[in-house]
Image: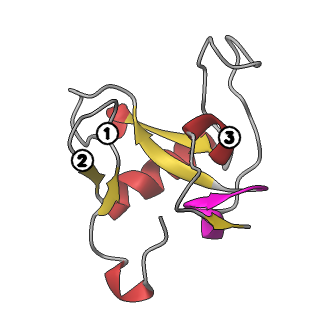
Amino acid sequence: MILPSSLKSEKYWVAGYAGSSEMAFSEDVVKQAWERAGEQCECRKRTHRHFYTPCGKVLVWENRGKVGRGGWEAHHITIDGGDALSNCEILCSNCSGIRPFSTPV
């Protein structure tokens, strides 16, 4: 999801896991997670081709919520972990499952 510049100081809304209600990360948490990730996908899902190592795809800050090269989104690691940095992971569009209402890159 891409927010207009007028909303940059607002919280980013992202879908929670399987049937949960929406949860939000503050802009500061997203920026800290982005810096921690080093502009790369942090996915370590065992069901993905990269298995136990991070995906590592290179991401582009401006491509948040977009599908394709450099596209990414901030996701909750666990449904009950809240909106803290420790529960935020940066995932590429492939690993995060961004699809239907996203803007192509």
Relative image position of residue 53 (x, y in whole percent):
70, 17
Q: Residue at x 63, y 35 (%)?
A: 95
The kind of residue tagged 1 is Gly
Residue at x 70% of width, y 53% of height: 59
Q: Any magenta on residue 25?
A: no
User: Is residue 64 found left or right of 4 in the rendered image?
Assistant: right
Q: How far apart are labels 1 and 2 at the CA level?
A: 6 Å
Write the start and end of the magenta stretch as one range. 61-69
* Image quadrant in which you'd find residue 13: bottom left
**Scheme of colours in the image:** secondary structure
Where does label 3 land, which residue? 94
Label annotation for residue 23: 2
Q: Quadrant of the C terminus?
A: bottom right
The structure residue drawn at horizontal position 34% and vertical position 40%, both measured from the top left corner, is 85
Is residue 20 depicted above or below 39 in this figure?
Answer: above
Rendered position, 34 above or below 61: above
Residue 77: image location, x then y, percent: 39, 28
Q: CA distance from mark 3 to mark 2?
A: 21 Å
The residue that disc 1 covers is: 16
**Residue type (three-letter) at the residue carrying disc 2:** Met
How many neighbours does mark 1 have within 10 angstroms: few (below 14), some (14-19), or many (20 or more)?
some
Q: Is residue 93 above or below residue 48?
A: below
Say which label, 1 or 2, has the lower sequence index.
Answer: 1
Residue 96, quarter of the rendered image:
top right
Q: Position of residue 69 (x, y in %)?
A: 79, 56
Numbered disc 2: secondary structure: strand
